[in-house]
């Protein structure tokens, strides 16, 4: 009888271990299936927010273009790396209140309209382009930087 009890107890332990193992495997599988969905939802949400901010920037540049035309100044500055002088940059940031980086790439002075710009917010990059026919295109990209290379200074090279 003691042998039978030990055998039953051992079988019960084995069954319990198998159940725990199956629950853990199921939990790991569910976790592995949920992680990509979570990241997709997170990136998609960030992309929608950045796209909305870029559309606000487009609207603000249209408004500022008219304002600067009225005071006899240009919105677009080719000599600046981001295409804007300090006054335009400050006004644009105060109007849009965005935390990303804006870079004006093209401007049509006849229509007083921005024809191309990029907006980067976190890992999301929104590119706006308007062709000669007035057709607009928007591209929203997730930027995944693997490595960033910069030129070394003479001190770093030991010269």
Image (cartoon, grey):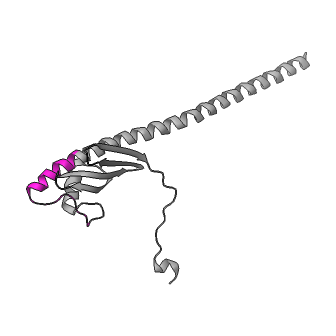
Task: Locate residue 13, reporting x and y percent.
Answer: 78, 25
| Span highlighted in magenta in the image | 59-79
156 or 79: nearer the eye?
79
Q: Is residue 61 above or below residue 2?
A: below
Question: What is the quadrant of residue 35 in the picture?
Answer: top right
Tell me: 142 left or right of 85.
Answer: right
**Relative to 87, is 96 above or below?**
above
Single out the residue that lies furthest toward the front.
Answer: 133
x, y percentage for residue 101? Answer: 32, 55
Image location of residue 66, percent across then percent down: 13, 51
Depicted 41 relative to depicted 88: above or below: above
Furthest residue to the top?
Answer: 1
Q: Is residue 62 magenta?
A: yes
Across and down, in percent, residue 136 comes to 29, 43
Looking at this rendering, what residue extends furthest in the bottom direction? Answer: 159
Task: Say whether residue 53 is left or right of residue 23.
Answer: left
Instruction: Give the residue at x 70% y 27%.
Output: 22
Looking at the image, which residue is at 21% across and 47% down?
60
Q: Nearer the viewer, residue 146 or 39?
A: 146
Q: Nearer the viewer, residue 114 or 145?
A: 114
For this view, does 77 lie left or right of residue 143? left
């Amino acid at each position: 009888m003691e042998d039978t009890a030990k055998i039953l107890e051992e079988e019960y332990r084995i069954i319990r271990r198998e159940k725990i193992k199956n629950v853990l495997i199921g939990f790991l599988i569910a976790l592995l299936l949920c992680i990509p969905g979570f990241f997709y939802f997170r990136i998609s949400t960030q992309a929608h927010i950045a796209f909305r901010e870029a559309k606000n920037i487009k609207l603000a540049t249209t408004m500022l273009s008219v304002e600067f035309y009225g005071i006899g100044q240009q919105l677009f500055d080719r000599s600046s790396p981001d295409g804007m002088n300090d006054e335009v940059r400050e006004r644009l940031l105060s109007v849009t209140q965005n935390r990303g980086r804006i870079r004006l790439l093209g401007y049509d002075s006849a229509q007083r309209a921005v024809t191309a710009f990029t907006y980067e917010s976190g890992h999301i990059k929104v590119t706006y382009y308007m062709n000669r026919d007035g057709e607009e295109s928007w591209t929203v990209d997730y930027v995944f930087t693997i490595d960033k290379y910069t030129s070394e200074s003479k001190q770093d090279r030991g010269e």
